Amino acid sequence: MTELPPRVARLFHNYDVRTIDAERDRQLVILTVLAYGEWEDIQWLFRTYGWDAVRDVVARDLQTVRSLPPSVLNLWSIVFWGKPLRPPEPRERWAPTRSPEPPS
């Protein structure tokens, strides 16, 4: 099990950090650090997971649930793809971000 460094572990106040594995829970770690981390935490994130892994998690978040706050998604959209997100239409602001999966 790969433990989180204490500086990063402090961001997971709603979790028992002893149960978080940095590799197994990579998506949770990346999203949490991007949303709540400081500069040193983000540097650790890129050293640990690399540019491509962080970009892939952000892209997946954009395409699915959108668990990152809009301002955070917008920042990382600029960093990774060089352009901000389109501002949401008024109706979109109130639309659900999660939709049920159709039955198989």
Image (spheres, helix red, strand yellow):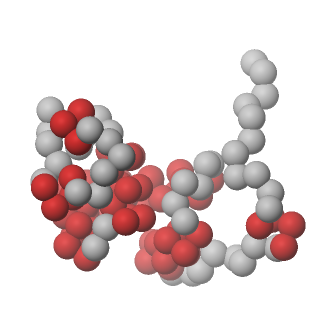
Residue 103, image x, y percentages: 78, 21
| 32 and 52: which is toward the camera | 32
- Residue at 52% x, 60% y: name it: 68
Residue 30, image x, y percentages: 35, 54
Q: Residue furthest right?
A: 91
- Residue at 13% x, 54% y: name it: 5
Image position of 80 with respect to 31: above or below: below
Q: Residue furthest front?
A: 14
Q: Residue furthest top?
A: 104
- Residue at 62% x, 48% y: name it: 64
Residue 80, image x, y percentages: 45, 72
Residue 42, image x, y percentages: 27, 68
| 27 and 36: which is toward the camera | 36
Q: Examine the image and state in which quarter residue 33 appears.
A: bottom left
Q: Is residue 81 visible?
A: no
Asked if residue 64 lies left or right of residue 47, the reply is right
Q: Examine the image and state in which quarter residue 36 appears.
A: bottom left
Asked if residue 1 lies left or right of residue 39, the reply is left
